[in-house]
Image (spheres, rainbow, N blue to C red):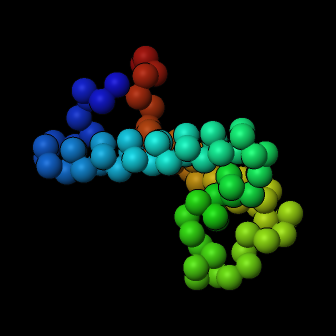
Amino acid sequence: MLTHRFVRNRYLDAFLKLVLLSGLTHIFILLAYYAKNGDLAILNHFNILDLDLFFPGITLTSANNIFPFVILFSVYSGVFFFFTGSRGKKK
């Protein structure tokens, strides 16, 4: 999986892979915590990003448990359509 280089610079490539692996590990830990305790707020994307440090109370209401998933899906869709190009399509 990680034998592919993201960028040509080895140092930057290693750093990007470190960030990716750390982020994935963090998400898996949060998923395990959710599975054990059933606390959906732990998966709130705003909570994961610690935006509550800048905007206190952003993660408190139930509507704020849905809105971050909508934002996350929107960002993912934007990255998918604008930054992945047409790789894999045969012309």
Q: Residue at x 64, y 65 (%)?
A: 46
Above or below for 37 versus 63: above
Q: Quadrant of residue 44?
A: bottom right
Q: Is residue 25 above or below residue 48?
A: above
The residue lying toward the viewer, choosing from 28 and 67, is: 28
Q: Nearer the viewer, residue 6 or 61?
A: 61
- Residue 91: percent from the left, percent from the top? 42, 19
Q: Residue at x 46, y 42 (%)?
A: 25
Tell whether 75 sits left or right of 20: right
Q: How many marks?
A: 0
- Residue 14 appears left or right of 18: left
Q: Give the residue furthest to the front.
A: 36
Residue at x 55%, y 64% (from the top left corner): 49
Where the N terminus falls, by quadrant? top left
What's the residue at 64%, 58% (across, down)?
A: 45
Q: Is residue 78 left or right of residue 73?
A: left
Q: Quadrant of residue 4?
A: top left
Residue 33, x across and y down, in percent = 65, 45
Residue 49 appears in the rendering: yes
Does residue 74 appear in this view?
no
Using the image as rendered, state which of residue 12 and residue 38 is in the foreground: 38
Q: Residue lying furthest right in this view?
A: 62
